[in-house]
Image (cartoon, helix red, strand yellow):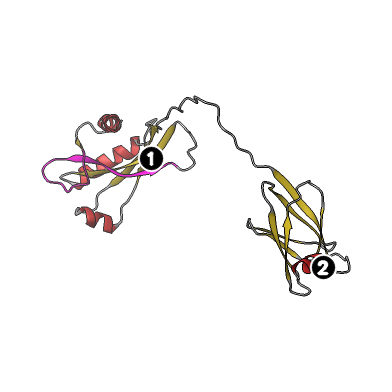
Amino acid sequence: MINQINEQIKLWLKDIVSDIEIRFCSPKDYVDTNQINIYLSSLEPVMGNTNPSFMQIKLKYLITICCASDEQVHSIAYRLLESGSGHPLFTMVPDRLSDDYWRALKVKPQPLFSITYVLEIPRQQRDAPFVKEPPNIVTTPMSHIYGTVLDAKDKPVSRCRLELQSQNRSVLTDYQGRFDLGQVSSASSSIINIYTRSDKRNYTYVFDKFDGKEVTISLEKLENNNA
């Protein structure tokens, strides 16, 4: 795939500047041959690609020109700039590199263009194994726990916190003492820890009657049972 892209780039540049050698290498200083150097500088994922069949990668090539004279360099750069927007697959734009980049390449700064191309790589599709037997589905019975918390005088206890011991779930009672802990597993008993603000006491209530009906929790009874 990459070889085909390289060949297309080379043929495209040959159509624009047929009188110069084209090489695939990093930028070079002039030695004895006028040349255009093509350097694959980066590969970046295309953001927002949601195609499940292909992974999209943006290839960026640096195109540099080195010739015996600046006049030749200017002439070639102008021809590339003039024809750079005429290709259906590649996008050519004038570009620049930092001084540190040029120093890392150990060459003097040169006229520079960038070519980008979006490469689509097929994702590997794995065949799902055949199901030889029907799946064994295990369900857990659930029940809804909700109700009211009352004090010793059978008055609602507001702002009382109820906490399911087996789950990271807690609720506060409203001004009528009502609470709703939602659905819980009815396969075993549920232990509810109760914390009050008025007397700063805590109580333990064991819920094991899973009939879907509203629960009334009397703090006086809980205190007597624990006595």
Q: Residues within 10 Å of mark 1 (few under 14, many from 20)?
A: some
Whole-percent x, y for residue 74 in the image: 25, 44
**Amino acid at dot 2:** Glu
Give the residue drawn at x 63%, y 39%: 139
Asked whether, in this view, residue 186 is left or right of residue 74, the answer is: right
Tell me which label, 2 or 1, sits earlier in the chain.
Answer: 1
The vertical placement of 181 against 220, above or below, is: above
Is residue 39 in the magenta section?
yes
Q: Number of labelled discs?
A: 2
**Amino acid at dot 1:** Lys
Give the residue drawn at x 45%, y 31%: 53
Q: Nearer the viewer, mark 2 or mark 1?
A: 2
Which of the 4 image quadrants contains residue 72? top left
Whole-percent x, y for residue 27 in the image: 22, 46
Which of the 4 image quadrants contains residue 227? bottom right
- Regarding mark 1 in the picture, which secondary structure is present there? strand
The boundaries of the magenta stretch are 24-46
Q: CA distance from mark 2 to mark 1?
A: 71 Å
Nearer to us in this view, 198 or 175: 198
Q: Residue furthest bottom?
A: 199
Whole-percent x, y for residue 75 in the image: 25, 41
**Numbered circle sitting on residue 58:** 1
Q: Residues within 10 Å of mark 2 (few under 14, many from 20)?
A: some
- Label 2, on which residue? 220
Whole-percent x, y for residue 50 in the image: 50, 37
The vertical placement of 111 against 98, above or below, is: above
